[in-house]
Image: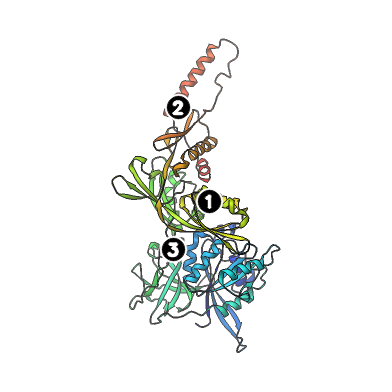
Amino acid sequence: MINIRNFCIIAHIDHGKSTLADRLLEITKTVEKRKMREQYLDQMELERERGITIKLQPVRMNYKFQNPKTFNFELFTLNLIDTPGHIDFSYEVSRSLAAVEGAILLVDASQGVEAQTITNVEMARALGLAIIPVLNKIDLPHARAEETSRELIDFLGVKPEEILKISAKTGEGVEFLLQEIIRRVPPPKLLIGQTSRAMIFDFEYSSHQGVIAYLRVFDGIFKKGDELKLHFADQKIIAAEVGIFTPLLRPTEQLSAGEIGYLATNIKRPEIVKVGDTVVSFRNPLPALSGYREPQPVVFSSIFPSLGEKFEELKNALHKLRLTDSAFSFEQEADAVLGRGFRCGFLGMLHMEIIIERIRREFKIDLITATPSVLYEVFGKDGKSRSVFSPSQFPDESEITKIKEPWLDFEILTPQAHLNKIISLSREYGAEIKNTDLFGERRLIIKGKMPLRELMRGFFDNLKSASQGYASFNYELSGQREAQVSRLDVLVAEEKVPAFSRVVAKDRLEYEGRRLVEKLYEILPRALFSVKIQAMAKGRIIASRALPALKKDVTGYLYGGDRTRKMKLWQKQKKGKQKLKERGRVNIPHEVFVKMIKN
């Protein structure tokens, strides 16, 4: 066990984690050269296409290291966990950190320390991990290696010689980094060592072996056939198989203390297995490992199949996605207009976007997606409170006494030149700026609070625009506060469309109402009769436009003669359109829902 090193790579998004993992796999010859491809550990097509890591991926590497004292070569086992960089997947990062003894803190030399970098370091420090600061992309002509080094020295309190400089793309300095991992990351320590105990940091599902749990073994030995128990689920299991990641699953005889591997459980109900749970011996169980908590969704949206007969297919698709993503949740619901669907919970807007895109690509199901919302606590006049996920289920204004909503603490790291624009933008989104401090030589860190619902209104995109792409943003939930919001409904042909409903700040109701009506007026196809588009809030219409009917020249075939014949035809057409208006229903195409939600 003294020759085992467990570590992960943490960084802000797009700082080169997956590229560095590729170089480590090449140098250790874990993957044959002919099989190597970019972002090797990113298994999903979406991950490679977007250039981001969505799901963590462990891998075991072997490396011969020359002992400086004996000059003999010793074989070391290096267990790497490649983690996502986007803030939506910070829970996966926290579980990865709990499974290792060290972390490579990767920083883009051209970008410097970012907001997410700070959060990752705080999590790593809280767990007492050895942190190796590494500057990446030093080969870029616009790299600011010296300035970024000074930021790391001030931020981490390290010496200049402790900061490694590499290019993950070219491989420069990567083998020396491997050697430093062996030198700086401590070997695993036994906590008690009397019997078996391990932590689940991820899982996948196999139709043959059930749930396959990804484990970090802290105590004892796990073998095939062992009688084990999931501590928090209080579920007995028999180890059907144990093994390691190469990065493909490879069975082994046993997993010992300090190792990272997998355990096939034969459990066919994936909701039983939770990330963060402790696996212990059934007959002689040790106490659970600390830090267990379930990921909590913060963004909610209702999704419906565009074709009603696809409901069962959508249900099966969601169940399959849940098998590989423990943070995704859903429950069935029904809507008078859109039919049967599901209310889904996500970790953030990117997480939502990824899930919806996977449904469309992998399962070939077209979706209607309602406007995303947060979880509100609504207090009624009867003194009771209830949780409301969907804007369409918001009670009428007359029934509400108070509403509470989630708020978040945020940090923005930006060059000083963009400070005024960012302060102004933050206030537009209801943010409260707490303080602004210098960070390094040319940048500032802005700390404040804002409602989570405002973050979903395109704050991040506008922040990038205001800072010309240089600002980075990080946040964490900080509890609930009273909200000044109302439900805004959209009516088409005097019929409410729940998918267009949204919860809006009271001081923005009229602006948002007009904006929604104008947008729908532009993209809704015209019908054979005039269609009224309205926005309604607080029991009154606050914006309205009439979409004119399609025109048909019913007198085109007539020529010459008395005008009376034309007038009769016009009157007949007018009466027909009036009947259509009274009896007809407007069919809103799927593309309209997509465009409305995107905007």
Q: What distance separates the C-alpha of mark 2 from that of mark 3?
A: 53 Å
- Look at the image and tell me whether residue 338 can be seen: no
Using the image as rendered, state which of residue 478 and residue 490 is in the foreground.
478
Which of the 4 image quarters holds residue 196? bottom left
Q: Residue at horizontal 46%, vertical 60%?
A: 325
| Disc 2, SS | helix
Alpha carbon of mark 3 to alpha carbon of mark 1: how far?
48 Å
Q: Position of residue 337 (x, y in %)?
A: 41, 40
Residue where numbered disc 1 is placed: 426
> What's the amino acid at mark 1?
Ser
Q: Nearer the viewer, mark 2 or mark 3?
A: 2
Q: Position of residue 73 (x, y in %)?
A: 61, 85
- Residue 207 numbered mark, or none: 3
Question: In the figure, 347 relative to 233: above or below?
Answer: above
Secondary structure of residue under mark 3: loop
- Give, as a three-letter code, the residue at label 3: Ser
Q: At 50% from the left edge and 42% from the top edge, which residue is drawn? A: 593
Element type where label 1 sits in the image? helix
Of residues 217 and 569, the one drawn nearer to the viewer in this rendering:
217
Q: Earlier in the sequence, mark 2 or mark 3?
A: 3
* Residue carrying label 2: 580
Counting other residues with Cα less than 10 Å from the Cα at mark 1, is it few (<14), some (14-19), or many (20 or more)?
Answer: many
Work out whether mark 3 precedes mark 1 in sequence or the reverse, and give the earlier one: 3
